[in-house]
Image (cartoon, helix red, strand yellow):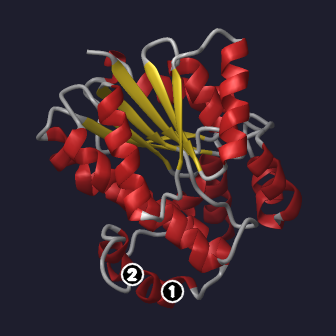
Amino acid sequence: MKKVYVITGGSGGIGIEVARRLGKQGTLLLADISEERLHQAVEQLAEEGISDVATQTVDITNEQQVERLAAAAVELGELGAIIHTAGLSPTMSSGRRIMEVNMVGTGLILKAFLPIAVPGSVAVCISSMSAYFFPRNDTYNGLLKQPLEDNFLDRIEVFTQGRPDMSYGMSKLGVQLIVEEQAWDWGQKGARIVSVSPGTINTAMGRQEAAESQSMKMLMDNTPLNRMGEATEIAAAVAFLCSLDSSYITGTDLRVDGGTVAKAQDLIKQRK
């Protein structure tokens, strides 16, 4: 049966590069909140010889729309992978909306796609190096693992104070915790679930954060590889995690950050 690769945020910088990597392995189903950007992505891919592409406009915080996305994937074939790149960064919205998209959206995507997973299916969720600057703490770890619980957004705001930067970093920690939490359930279906944590990446979103955030500039100045990463480098990591070469990797995070976190942690120790 034909494999289907679903990419949320499919018209974004990372999403389109993942589509290029996986587009010749099966059918692509690109999901995004913008129909216009999806249309542009399809045209771009077609010019490069990738034509087996379906699209669906989806707000990932809308459960019915997410369920329709999963249903569309079933109609197209067998789930090869769900690559969840959709999300908001600190300068893009309010803290509450960032938490809703990054956490509730992730919860809804995984809830909808786990039932259609088959042996060999993979879920890849995009986290962030920002997650590594938030300590794992029993006071909120349990809550972050369950973003679909009642009043989640109100309860987590006690810890984020509604700040976009706090909401972003904590939401990306939450993505990693969810991946660890759900590894067993996906494993029972012969499927895997992993996350990827990019550093500062040369996409529209990454450039916006680098330009507007002092903390991001500090991290860039202390990146061992002394440059931004490219979306192609994140797509390469995702392609590896979707391949048989990673068949024993699940329930964990792959950091692709040019060494930023390693150096930043070293700086923190020096200041103590």
Residue at 56% x, 50% y: name it: 86
Q: How far across and how far down the image is residue 160, in percent?
A: 55, 82
Q: Which residue does the numbered mark 1 point to in the structure image?
A: 157
Q: Secondary structure at mark 1?
A: helix
Mark 1 crowd level (few <14, some 14–19, many ≥20, 10 Å Cα):
some
* Depth check, front residue: 96 or 70: 70
Residue 87 sits in quarter: bottom right
Q: Which numbered circle lies on residue 71?
A: none
Query: Which amino acid does the dot numbered 2 rest on?
Result: Phe
Q: Which residue does the numbered mark 2 point to in the structure image?
A: 152
What quarter of the picture does the N terminus occupy?
top left
Q: Can residue 122 be seen from the camera position used here?
A: no
141 sits to left or right of 23: left
Residue at 17% x, 39% y: name it: 187
* Depth check, front residue: 7 or 225: 7
Q: Earlier in the sequence, mark 1 or mark 2?
A: 2
> Farthest residue in the top direction?
49
Q: CA distance from mark 1 to mark 2?
A: 8 Å
Residue at 58% x, 88% y: name it: 161
Query: Which amino acid does the dot numbered 1 rest on?
Result: Glu
142 sits to left or right of 198: left
Could you tell me if the residues under marks 1 and 2 are in contact, i.e. CB atoms within 8 Å? no
* Depth check, front residue: 177 or 109: 109
